[in-house]
Amino acid sequence: MIKIKIAKETDTAILALLARVTWVESHGHYIEDKNNLLEYLNKNFSVSKTKQDINDPKNFFYIVYVDDLPVGYAKLVLNEKQESVVSDNSCRLERIFIQNEFIPLKVGQKLLTFVEKKAKALQSDTMWLSVYIKNKRAIRFYERNEFKNVGELNFLVNGKAYENIVFSKEI
């Protein structure tokens, strides 16, 4: 059974671990310098950084469970502007990650639908996100979900730039 819950401060360690594992699964092979990868993970997905993020009132974290096992999560950031997105009430889907072994269960689709409804209930009218240009599976997923390519940005991992597509969708 699939359940989605809003993450609370008591979920910080689970969220930090999920973030590290899923980020490495989805992006780790793109980062040539594994020291850069480790440094990025330590900086962005530590328990203390995750606690700081979860306590920021503009951030909303959602954890998805399969049979009570946490298998993925999403991070929604309210009122996050992006130059290629025309909206005064946009939000950013900063992260949505599912552990690889659970992707065939369509857990990501359920989580995205859930987060879109939450964003709309929080009075956002547009959701945007960025995807690495080589992440073809994610690009297909967002295109199937009616996100439109509206621009690009560089995602930095310890100073090295990775070209990303900016996708946007009215919700």
Image (cartoon, rainbow, N blue to C red):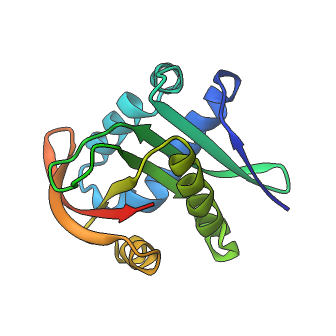
Q: Residue at x 38, y 78 (%)?
A: 143
Viewer-proximal residue among 138 and 118: 118
Picture coordinates of residue 152, whole percent (x, y): 16, 61
Question: On the rendered structure, is 21 left or right of 80?
Answer: right
Asked which quadrant contains residue 167, the reply is bottom left
Q: Residue at x 15, y 49 (%)?
A: 83
Q: Is residue 120 above or below residue 166?
A: above
Viewer-proximal residue among 68 and 87: 87
Viewer-proximal residue among 46 and 130: 130
Picture coordinates of residue 37, whole percent (x, y): 33, 44
Q: Residue at x 49, y 23 (%)?
A: 57
Picture coordinates of residue 108, whole percent (x, y): 59, 65
Question: On the rendered structure, is 137 left or right of 129?
Answer: right
Picture coordinates of residue 26, whole percent (x, y): 44, 61
Q: Residue at x 28, y 43 (%)?
A: 88
Asked which quadrant contains residue 117, the reply is bottom right
Q: Is residue 1 above or below residue 106?
A: above
Res 140 seen here:
yes
